[in-house]
Image (cartoon, rainbow, N blue to C red):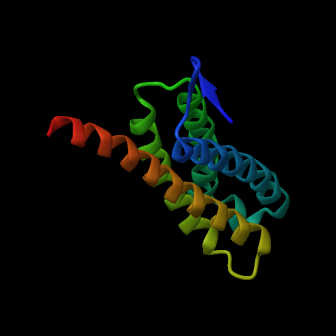
């Protein structure tokens, strides 16, 4: 169980941290795979998107682990990047490695969206 500054992180944030960690690792592994495959696997737009996804996942994980005030903002960007990476990877039909990456990216995108919403809801309730 993750703890920050002596406080427990919410289950939603803990799951998001795990999903970001997994997504970042899978994207890094898939980047290596794409380099080996060559051709359209290393097309610049696709390849840069995979690098962006791996990096934003690591950044999001770090922000959540230190309970940064900017976690939700970073996770909102992460959700978008992961969704776009999933769309790009899913274009490689018949390629199990790329389909796995797409699935992991989609899961991370959904998890980041949930985390962002969970942060917004308590703030909205407090405003009432």
The residue lying furthest to the right in this view is 36
Q: Kindly identify the residue that appears in the image at 61 percent across and 59 percent down.
A: 105
Give the x, y percent position of residue 58.
63, 37
Q: Nearer the viewer, residue 43 or 123?
A: 123
Q: Nearer the viewer, residue 35 or 53?
A: 53
Determine which quarter of the picture holds residue 69.
Answer: top left
Q: Is residue 90 above or below residue 74?
A: below
The residue lying furthest to the top in this view is 5
Give the x, y percent position of residue 81.
50, 52
Q: Kindly identify the residue that appears in the image at 78 percent across and 68 percent down.
A: 97
Query: As drawn, is 33 to the left or to the right of 47?
Result: right
Query: As drawn, is 110 to the left or to the right of 4?
Result: left
The residue lying furthest to the left in this view is 128
Label count reads: 0
Q: Kindly identify the residue that appears in the image at 46 percent across and 42 percent down.
A: 75
Give the x, y percent position of residue 103.
64, 67
Query: As drawn, is 103 to the left or to the right of 115?
Result: right
Name the quadrant of the N terminus. top right
Give the x, y percent position of residue 55.
62, 39
Q: Is residue 69 above or below residue 108?
A: above
Name the quadrant of the C terminus. top left
Q: Is residue 117 above or below residue 46?
A: above
Q: Kindly identify the residue that appears in the image at 63 percent across and 52 percent down.
A: 50
């Amino acid at each position: 169980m993750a703890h920050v500054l002596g406080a427990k992180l919410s289950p939603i944030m803990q799951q998001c941290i795990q999903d970001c960690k997994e997504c970042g690792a899978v994207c890094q592994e898939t980047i290596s795979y794409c380099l080996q495959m060559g051709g359209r696997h290393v097309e610049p737009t696709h390849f840069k998107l995979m690098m962006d996804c791996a990096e934003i996942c690591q950044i999001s994980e770090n922000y959540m682990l230190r309970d940064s005030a900017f976690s939700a903002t970073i996770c909102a960007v992460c959700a978008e990047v992961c969704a776009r990476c999933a769309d790009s990877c899913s274009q490689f039909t018949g390629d199990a490695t790329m389909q796995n990456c797409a699935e992991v990216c989609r899961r991370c995108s959904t998890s980041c969206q949930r985390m962002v919403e969970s942060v917004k809801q308590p703030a909205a309730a407090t405003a009432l």
